[in-house]
Amino acid sequence: MENQTTDFADMPLTTEFDYGDSATPCLQIEEKHFAATLLPPLYSLVVIFGLIGNMLVVLILVKYKRLKSMTDIYLLNLAISDLLFIFSLPFWAYYAVHDWIFGDALCRILSGIYLLGFYSGIFFIILLTLDRYLAIVHAVFALKARTATYGILTSAVTWAIAMFASVPGIVFHKTQKESTRFTCSPHYPSEQRNVWKQFLTLKMNILGLVIPMLIMICSYAQIIKTLLQCRNEKKHKAVRLIFIIMIVYFFFWAPYNICILLRDFQGIFSVTTCEGNGQLHKATQVTETISMIHCCINPIIYAFAGEKFRKYLRSFFRKQIAFHFSKYCPVFYVDTAERASSTYTQSTGEQEVSAAL
């Protein structure tokens, strides 16, 4: 996702001119102002909701579910990936309006963290898809394969691959003074600038869109076929959830991938005017921000949509948040205590214990 960092870090505030694929310089004053106005508030919203949602996922998985299955391992790693992705956003939000003041080391580190969060998030979504495929289509084989041990091993390999894919972001990003501003942006070898730029864009499209979509389509097609053949009252809900997962992923990521493909291959797509170049940059900024919202949606799709997960979440709020709040509100304390005493019986207690095991 090297070009993602370029979009909000390089484009708004690096240089006064953008030559693109032509020799004619294009002023980007309007695009810079657009980025400075749009990006900070949207990034702030993504940080707030993404941080809350993914921290809750981590808390529930560790405190209640105890990471006993492969699915839990993948969900935990996906939440960590989203948190890494979110961690760098406040810095880029500040940079969209001001100079880069955080130094060269943080420029490289934050670019690497951003890319690591993106690639690992995509890869763990793929692993969750394959996990569902094994559980439903190859249920017998899944009993042996879908263990926490294999989940940890595959997660370690996935992180290693994601780190390798993030290396160009660390290598090419650096701090530099351009005109009167300090910037943090990718600087490719001058004689191979377009080659590197187009190669990394293709890599991002292949790893971030093409491969995940192919795996999702093939896996979910078999899952739907299997569910429709079995007699299960909940099969319609499962099929509906599968369609939601595919549509949401495609909606959030496809527009951005298409925009950066058009932007970095302008010559091929006959986009050679400054006006067209500016429109592409604006579209890239908007679609990039939309794609970031996916890290806020992940907890809802992969965790909160589960019945058990919602039960653990209610239990957490009732026992932790409501209990502490009741110390400052006696009326609320009485109401909470009465509900707890009336609902907790020996049978329900046994059911909660058995559900947690």
Image (spheres, rainbow, N blue to C red):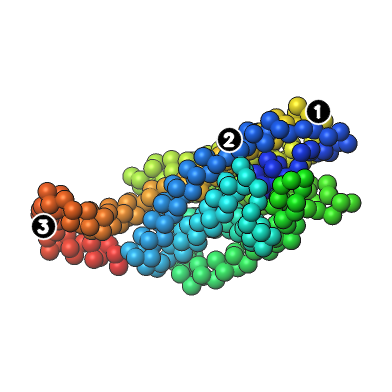
Taking the spot 52% from the left edge, 40% from the top edge, the residue there is 42
Q: Is residue 128 in sight in this rendering?
A: no
Mark 3, other Cα within 10 Å: few <14 / some 14–19 / many ≥20: few
Q: Amino acid at mark 1?
A: Thr
Q: Inspect the image, locate mark 3, and give the three-letter code of the amino acid beneath it.
A: Ser
Rendering coords of residue 337 (x, y %): 12, 55
Q: Position of residue 262 (x, y in %)?
A: 74, 36
Where is residue 336 drawn, in percent x and y? 15, 52
Disc 1 to disc 3, C-alpha distance: 71 Å
Which residue in the protein does label 3 denote?
341
Residue marked by disc 2: 37
Circle number at residue 273: 1
Residue 39: where, in percent of width, then height? 57, 40
Binning the other alpha carbons within 10 Å of mark 2 as few (below 14), some (14 to 19) or many (20 upward) gives few
Can you tell which of label 3 and label 2 is closer to the viewer? 2
Closer to the camera: disc 1 or disc 3? 1
What's the residue type where badge 2 is placed? Thr
Residue in the foreground of this view, choosing between 47 and 271: 47
Give whichever of 97, 4 is nearer the camera.
97
| Secondary structure at numbered mark 1 | loop
Query: In the displayed structure, would residue 104 be above or below residue 33?
Result: below
Look at 67% across and 36% down and name the residue there.
32
* Chain-order first, disc 2 or disc 1: 2
Rendered-image quadrant of the C terminus:
bottom left
**94 versus 139 height, above or below:** above
Residue 220 to residue 105: above or below: above
- Label 1 environment density (alpha carbons within 10 Å; few <14, some 14–19, many ≥20): some
Task: Specify whether 202 is left or right of 229.
Answer: right
**Can residue 44 be seen?**
yes
